[in-house]
Amino acid sequence: MTTVVCWNICKRSAPWNELLAMDADVALLQEAGKVPPDLPSSIDTGSITTTGDRWNDLVDFKSWPLVVKLSDRVKVEWFKRVLPLYRSTGPDEMVVSDVGTIAAARVIPREQEPFIVVSMYSRWLRPHSSTSTKWVAGYSDASTHRIISDLSAFIGDLDSSTHRILAAGDLNTVLGSTDTKLVLPDRDRMVFERMDALGLEFMGPQHPDGRQTIPTPSGLPENTRNVPTFYAPKAKTPENAVHQLDYVFASRGFHSSLRVRALNDPDEWGSSDHCRILIEVS
């Protein structure tokens, strides 16, 4: 079995030590921030440099999503992020449409078939200055659609069982919410529909694979299976976490070998404002 951890670590240093203590194989990080210089030799973040000048002046953004090798039980081959160009990408390259949104790699376990992993981070964007708006945070769906477009490059057949893709991360949306103060419900729903159209099965985490919020958050149906994965600054602690922002998808067929669980009980949450998502690949 290969163990993958998905985690938005909010640019904090403490989560790195917690990742080490988990004895996992691979981490899909968002908002990774500065990588500690004193990591054990078994941990490898790959090359976070990219080809093309676009990223050279955006040091902060280029470190946000990372694929991290945590153990020697797997080999990891990272894809270099390159600008959209009118040429074919090399076997070790991937086109990225927007900075700070995606990182991908091929994971090669010792005793399992290789699979592709993708760490996703949907950034909040502001509407154009030519339009008036009351959206304080902006919108995240456009960023997610760019991620999906980049992810589509790894899909080359209508038969999704020919692919072995695991994509996970912080999409900054609340599945099923009708609360327009939080999300754009119709637009955000299209994100999940588009993933499904690509043959990527929604894997949760969903209850019972994680603690639920009681009472049900405003804007969600009573039968929601969402589990809180994030607490806002005003909430202060995991006990007060309300909404799910982090999600996992896997190519249909491959998805049956995955188990996904939110480590969102207060005593297992971890030192970030997002909880850890545990993904076991058998």
Image (cartoon, grey):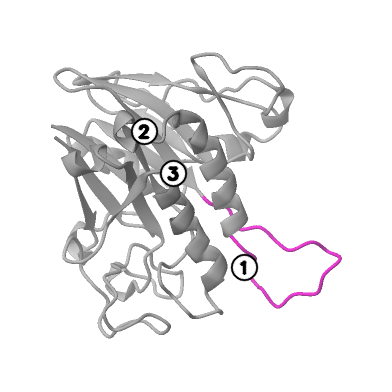
Give the class, few, some or many, for how many residues have Cα within 10 Å of label 1's Cα (few <14, many ≥20): few
The picture places residue 116, in percent across and down from the top left corner, at 36, 29
Q: Which mark is residue 137?
A: 1
Q: Mark 2: which secondary structure? A: strand
Q: Earlier in the sequence, mark 3 or mark 2?
A: 2
**Residue 199, above or below 110:** below
Q: Position of residue 160 (x, y in %)?
A: 34, 37
Q: CA distance from mark 3 to mark 1?
A: 28 Å
Q: Residue 80 at x, y = what percent?
A: 53, 21
Q: CA distance from mark 3 to mark 2?
A: 16 Å
Task: Between label 3 and label 1, give the one nearer the viewer.
Answer: 3
The residue under label 1 is which amino acid type? Ala
Q: Nearer the viewer, residue 249 or 73?
A: 249
Which residue appears at 39% of the width and 68% of the height?
Answer: 231
Quarter holding the C terminus is top left
Q: Earlier in the sequence, mark 3 or mark 1?
A: 1
Residue at 65% across / 73% down in the picture?
Answer: 136
- Outermost residue, front side: 158
Amino acid tagged 2: Val
Residue 146, relative to residue 48: is it above or below? below
Which mark is drawn over residue 198? 3
Which residue type does callout 3 highlight? Answer: Leu
